[in-house]
């Protein structure tokens, strides 16, 4: 905490080892944190975030650092504690965390899930009884209607793509090979009430140990795959689309005989990514595609009670002022996709937010009644806060800010785990 801002001191290092990307070197647990403002008492649970944090010296790429989990526990209007731990994994379970069927799973697409306990201690790989032998997407979907966990793996050897479905009890019920022409980099996918959507895009995958793990192809083409839930892989229907990359899914839903799919898309590798919408007409076999907004954004999140169902709002992180390959400023934005209205929260000079997670204000709360939680780095202090914003009044001052006992490096995806009712 007392070290100087690392931006200048470590300017010669690659971005992922300098400034607030620089790893922290220990595991700590601290009780009772200082809060500014008023923590809503309905926030009862833990915010947990995963991210690369190299443990054994510098890594050549941000994605290759060992995973570290950071957790902030809130209840009764108090910030009860902070804890961080590395994820012990054969490779790097450093991307996200999900809770399903009572299990907390740290995820990265390069490794089977690593189960962790409530104190973030690694319990070992969770392979669904040995059925899952390769990396699982860091973006599985939990269907709010069935409680199922839907996910996929991609691989260098055929089948290049496999779709999996575990029931609400966490028991694997389906492992469905899907035929595609080549291994491609597939970070995310989408579900609706009756379908699963895959993105077969011209980003060829050569393995993460390859000096050029992913490569843009001018000839591969681009298509969206639509598989009825419960069907076999041969029932996949493909829709040609304009070539591009899809980093993250916002959400997808059914609208009559069409499927609406919102994503963050780039024109090609390393191009700025923007909010984008596909409308697939299942009767006519056509796709309409168009940008929803022009800003360079990432980390889209919705109210996850709407996963696969019609959503109205999404939050995104606008990435600004790039230097040394990374943004030096972010603005949190929330889009009302019905009205086109966009609200924003700028955390101010020298304060940079990460992905924001939506937490509903209560079980019966609407999609816009809740809070956005984000870890914010304060460059002047070289420290971090967990900031709570009112999702329906984003431009307002934070509802509360929790001063964390240590700097939390920029990471990837977080999640809120509400205490059981
Ligand atoms: Fe991701």
Image (cartoon, rainbow, N blue to C red):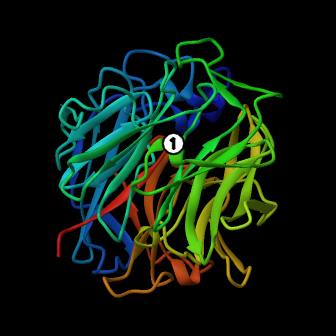
Please identify the quadrant where the C terminus is shown.
Answer: bottom left
The crowd level at tag 1 (other Cα within 10 Å; few <14, some 14-19, many 20+) is: few
Residue 201 in view here: yes
> What residue is at 55 percent from the left and 63 percent from the top?
251
Q: Is residue 335 above or below residue 70?
A: below
| Placement of the N terminus among the 4 image quadrants | top left
Residue at 58% over, 25% down: 183
Say which element carries label 1. helix
Examine the rendered structure and indicate whether residue 273 appears above or below residue 159: below
Q: 175 or 146, which lies in front?
A: 175
Residue 195: where, in percent of width, then height? 50, 60
The residue singled out by tag 1 in the image is 234
Give the mark count: 1
Nearer the observer, 10 or 149: 149
Image position, residue 33 (x, y; %): 28, 61
Q: Residue at x 56, y 72 (%)?
A: 254
* Percent of width and height locating residue 125: 23, 31
Q: 222 left or right of 258?
A: right
- Indicate whether 388 appears above or below 407: below
Quarter of the image where one finds residue 10: top right
Q: Is residue 244 left or right of residue 121?
A: right
x, y percent for residue 216: 75, 27
Q: Nearer the viewer, residue 214 or 146?
A: 146
Based on the displayed image, in which of its 4 quarters is residue 346 positioned?
bottom right
Residue at image point 55% right, 28% down: 62
């Amino acid at each position: 905490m007392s070290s100087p801002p690392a931006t200048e001191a470590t300017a010669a290092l690659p971005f992922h080892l300098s400034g607030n990307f620089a790893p922290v070197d220990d595991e700590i647990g601290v009780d009772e944190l200082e809060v500014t403002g008023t923590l809503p008492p309905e926030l009862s649970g833990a915010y947990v975030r995963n991210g690369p944090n190299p443990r054994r010296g510098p890594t050549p790429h941000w994605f290759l650092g060992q995973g570290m989990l950071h957790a902030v526990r809130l209840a009764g209007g108090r910030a009860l504690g902070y804890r961080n731990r590395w994820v012990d994994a054969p490779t790097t379970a450093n991307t996200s965390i999900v809770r399903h069927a009572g299990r907390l799973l740290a995820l990265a697409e390069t490794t089977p899930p690593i189960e962790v306990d409530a104190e973030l201690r690694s319990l070992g790989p969770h392979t669904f009884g040995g059925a899952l032998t390769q990396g699982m997407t860091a973006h599985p979907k939990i269907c709010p209607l069935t409680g199922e966990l839907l996910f996929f793996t991609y691989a260098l050897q055929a089948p290049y793509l496999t779709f999996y479905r575990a029931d609400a009890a966490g028991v694997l019920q389906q492992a469905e090979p899907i035929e595609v022409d080549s291994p491609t980099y597939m970070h995310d996918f989408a579900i609706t009430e009756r379908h699963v959507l895959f993105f077969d895009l011209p980003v060829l995958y050569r393995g993460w140990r390859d000096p050029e793990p992913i490569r843009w192809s001018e000839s591969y083409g681009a298509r969206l795959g639509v598989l009825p839930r419960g069907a076999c892989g041969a029932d996949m229907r493909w829709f040609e689309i304009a070539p591009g990359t899809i980093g993250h899914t916002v959400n997808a839903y059914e609208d009559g005989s069409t499927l609406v799919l919102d994503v963050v898309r780039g024109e090609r590798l390393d191009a700025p990514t923007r909010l984008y919408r596909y409308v697939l007409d299942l009767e006519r076999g056509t796709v309409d595609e168009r940008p929803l907004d022009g800003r360079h954004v990432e980390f889209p999140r919705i109210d996850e009670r709407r996963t696969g169902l019609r959503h109205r709002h999404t939050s995104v992180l606008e990435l600004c002022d790039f230097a040394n390959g990374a943004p030096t400023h972010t603005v949190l934005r929330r889009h009302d996709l019905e009205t086109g209205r966009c609200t924003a929260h700028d955390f101010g000079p020298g304060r940079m937010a990460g992905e924001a997670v939506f937490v509903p204000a209560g079980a019966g709360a609407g999609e816009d009644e809740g809070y956005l939680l984000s870890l914010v780095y304060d460059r002047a202090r070289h420290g971090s806060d967990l900031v709570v914003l009112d999702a329906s009044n984003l431009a307002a001052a934070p509802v509360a800010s929790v001063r964390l006992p240590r700097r939390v490096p920029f990471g990837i995806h977080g999640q809120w785990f509400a205490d059981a009712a």
